[in-house]
Image: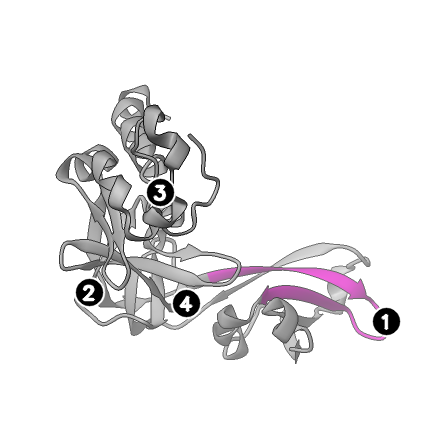
């Protein structure tokens, strides 16, 4: 990390992490974690939370975080995608499989690959893992061996879709979301994503053109919300 950025970012991170613990040590004997739900104690650190509105940050915290926003907007997205598959059989066909999140496979269903053909989509585990297996038939002349990893590339024809910068999207184990500017606060909003390029990602559902989202630092906002609503990793 650039040492010149450490001081303001460090201050902001401390404010976010300590947002749920503003009381002095002398009052900790009667400390009630239920107060964090409304972020009452976060006022001392400049970070509070209100259900339905989102995180509220003081101007000092916003400045220290160097918080950046951008509008969701339509753009022609020529997504370049790579997928890594592993060869699992070589007779009578050379077959390789790749496992992807279920909400990311649509572009692959409608695309062609150089030296490979998508022959099957196995959704048998999707209810438990949210993952699907794509099975490809590879060009037999490439002399693949069982266990080999191959990178398959495809280019999707450019089309106009709603996009945000890739850094605005945080993809967790159970949810994919962005932080939307909401009347001066920052509201976590679930989204469905689609095609991706090096810099942008398609928002298939959850936002409208013109919505303003946080580009950075999304992960720190998420940690602050966890602290204020669930006391996750709470410490004094």
Q: Is residue 83 magenta?
A: yes
Name above or below for residue 8 compared with residue 19.
above
150 or 120, which lies in front?
A: 120
Residue 74 x, y percent position in the rendering: 23, 69
Magenta stretch prevailing secondary structure: strand
Question: Of all residues shown, which one is farthest toward the front?
Answer: 30
Q: Is residue 131 magenta?
A: no
Label placed on residue 195: 4
Label placed on residue 211: 2
Q: In which quarter of the image is residue 155?
A: bottom left
Mark 1 or 3 closer to N-term?
Answer: 1
- At horizontal 32% and vertical 54% (from top left) the residue drawn is 168
Q: Distance between the residues labelled 4 and 2?
A: 19 Å
- At horizontal 38% and vertical 54% (from top left) the residue drawn is 198
**Dot 3 and dot 4 residues touching (CB under 8 Å):** no
> What is the magenta range?
81-100
Label placed on residue 91: 1
Residue 17 x, y percent position in the rendering: 36, 36
């Amino acid at each position: 990390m650039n040492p010149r950025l450490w001081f303001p970012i460090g201050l902001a991170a401390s404010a976010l992490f300590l947002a749920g613990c503003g009381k002095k040590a002398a009052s900790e004997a009667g400390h009630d974690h239920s107060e964090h739900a409304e972020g009452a104690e976060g006022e001392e650190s400049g970070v509070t939370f209100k259900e339905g509105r989102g995180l509220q940050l003081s101007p000092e915290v916003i400045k220290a975080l160097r918080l950046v926003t951008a509008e969701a907007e339509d753009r022609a997205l020529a997504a370049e995608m790579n997928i890594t598959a592993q060869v699992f059989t070589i007779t009578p066909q050379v077959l390789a499989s790749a496992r992807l999140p279920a909400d990311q496979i649509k572009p692959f269903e409608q695309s062609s690959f150089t030296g490979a053909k998508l022959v099957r989509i196995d959704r048998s585990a999707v209810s438990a893992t949210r993952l699907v297996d794509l099975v490809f038939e590879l060009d037999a002349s490439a002399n693949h061996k069982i266990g080999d990893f191959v990178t398959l590339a495809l280019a999707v024809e450019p089309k106009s879709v709603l996009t945000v910068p890739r850094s605005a999207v945080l993809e967790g184990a159970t949810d994919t979301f962005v932080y939307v500017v909401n009347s001066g606060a920052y509201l976590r909003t679930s989204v469905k994503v689609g095609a991706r390029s090096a810099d942008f990602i398609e928002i298939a559902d959850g936002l409208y053109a013109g919505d303003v989202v946080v580009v950075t630092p999304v992960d720190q906002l998420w940690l602050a919300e966890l602290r204020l609503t669930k006391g996750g990793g709470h410490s004094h």
